[in-house]
Image: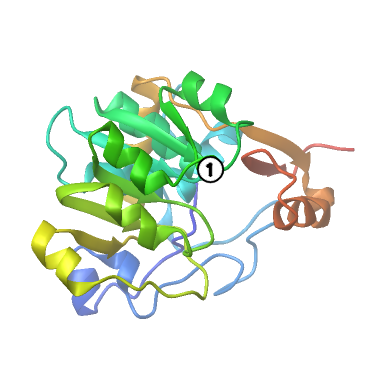
Amino acid sequence: MVSWFGGSCGHCAFCRAGDAVHCPERKVPGLSYPGGWAQSPTVPADALARVPDGLGLVDAAPFGCAGVTAFNAVRKAGIRAGGRVAVFGIGGLGHLAVQFASRLGYETIAIARGTDREAVSRELGAHHIDSSARAPGAALKKLGGADLIVYTASSTAPADELLTGLNVHGRLTLVGVDAGALTVPAAQLVMNGHTLTGHLTGSPRETEETMAFAVTHDIRPVIEQLPLTQADEAVHRLRGGHARFRIVLDPHATI
């Protein structure tokens, strides 16, 4: 498979340090070269990740972007064993982050607006907080605070309040962003030792590790499958918020 990360230069300081995803010449399929939605794309060999046995190609597809992003955001945070992880935004990224956090042994809390995601959040292994009924940061604090908040929502507006739900030395990792900005009192960060950071994606090797972990721990994306010929419809549904979690386009399927 090829993921959102579609290749790098191989010789810059980031590539030589093993951090190819931050290569200034990083490539993205469909943007850097054609074939992001094609039956047979041509991609750089160093961008390929091997899909493991036990994982079908349709289920594997979301792991190249949402999956590896969510997995790395949780496992690289350095949270204490048995700590509490909250996932803000239970969508394409968030529903995978919940599964990874739960399977990694963390007490996991899913934060979504409304109650329509409560049942699925519990099925995925998380306690549920309705952010439309109460301020999520305050709710987290009442539960004892979070050691890590994985922020997957597309709007950054609620992030400031969420910081109040972090434990001392807690971390908020942004993986969902918009054009907004955060306003965080400096004293709050200093006095509580908080870390506010961003996270992008993962390398092909990390994508392979993500899929291997998913196979071992029975983690799967919740998807809708459409034929490639309905790509426009898929985009409109995603933009309108009418897709449940992830849509996978199948180039071999017919209407």
Q: Residues within 10 Å of mark 1 (few under 14, many from 20)?
A: many
* Res 155 seen here: yes
Q: Please give the residue where the numbered disc 1 appears in the rendered image.
A: 62
- Report the colour scheme: rainbow
Total labels: the figure holds: 1
- Image position, residue 163 (x, y; %): 30, 56
- Whether 2 is drawn above or below 226: the answer is below
* Quadrant position of the C terminus in the picture: top right
SS at mark 1? helix
**Which residue is farthest right?**
255
- Image position, residue 89 (x, y; %): 50, 46
Front residue of 222/167: it is 167
* Res 200 seen here: no
Tag 1: residue type? Pro
Tell me the residue at 83%/52% (across/down): 233
Seen in the image, is 29 located left or right of residue 7? Answer: right
Tell me the residue at 55%/42% (across/down): 61
Front residue of 22/137: it is 137
- Image position, residue 180 (x, y; %): 49, 74
Front residue of 8/98: it is 98
Seen in the image, is 235 located left or right of residue 110? Answer: right
Front residue of 75/79: it is 79
